Amino acid sequence: TARHNLGCDEWNNGNPEKAAKHWIIAATHGNDDSIKVLMMVFKGGAISKEVLAAALRANQAAVDAAKSPQRDVAEEYRRSKGTFW
C-alpha cells in the first residue's frame, strides 16, 4: 500500500522513526508486508515490544473485520482458477 511504500522511502532516507509510523499505520489497515518489516525493525531495536504488539493486534483486528463469507467464496474461486486475472 501507499503507507507501506512511504515507510520504505523514509527508511531509505534515514528517517527510521517516520518509517515506523508509516508501517504501523499500514499494519493497522491489514498490510502484512508492514508487519513483516516491523518485526525486522523490532529485532534491530528501532521499536519497542509494546509498539510491535499494538501493531499486531490492530493488524489482526483489521484482517478479522475484512472477513466475510463472500470474500471466502471469491478467494476459493480465484485459487481454483490458478490466476488472479
Image: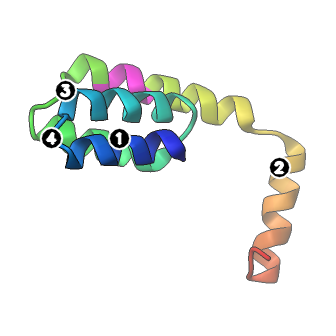
> How crowded is the residue under tag 4: few (<14 C-alpha within 10 Å), some, or many (20+)?
few
Which element carries disc 3, helix, strand or loop? loop
Q: Residues within 10 Å of mark 1 (few under 14, many from 20)?
A: many
Q: Which residues are magenta?
A: 52-56
Q: Is residue 44 left or right of residue 54?
A: left
Write down the residue under mark 2.
71
Q: Are marks 2 and 3 in contact (CB under 8 Å)?
A: no
Judged by depth in the image, the label closer to the viewer, 4 or 2, is 4
Residue 53 magenta-highlighted: yes
Element at badge 1? helix
Disc number lying in front (2 or 3): 3
Question: In the rendered structure, which disc, 2 or 3, sits on the residue that comes first in sequence?
Answer: 3
Numbered circle sitting on residue 14: 4
Residue at 39% of width from left, 32% of height from top?
A: 22
Q: Earlier in the sequence, mark 1 or mark 4?
A: 1
3D distance between C-alphas at marks 4 and 2: 39 Å
Q: Is residue 38 left or right of residue 79?
A: left
**Residue 7 disc label:** 1
Which image quarter: residue 16? Answer: top left
- Mark toward the start of the polypeptide (3 vs 4): 4
Label 1 vs 3, first from the N-terminus: 1
From the top left corner, tell me how far across and down residue 35 is, in percent.
39, 41
Where's the C terminus, which quadrant?
bottom right
Q: CA distance from mark 3 to mark 4?
A: 15 Å
Residue at image point 71% right, 29% down: 65
Question: Residue placed farthest to the front in the image?
Answer: 13
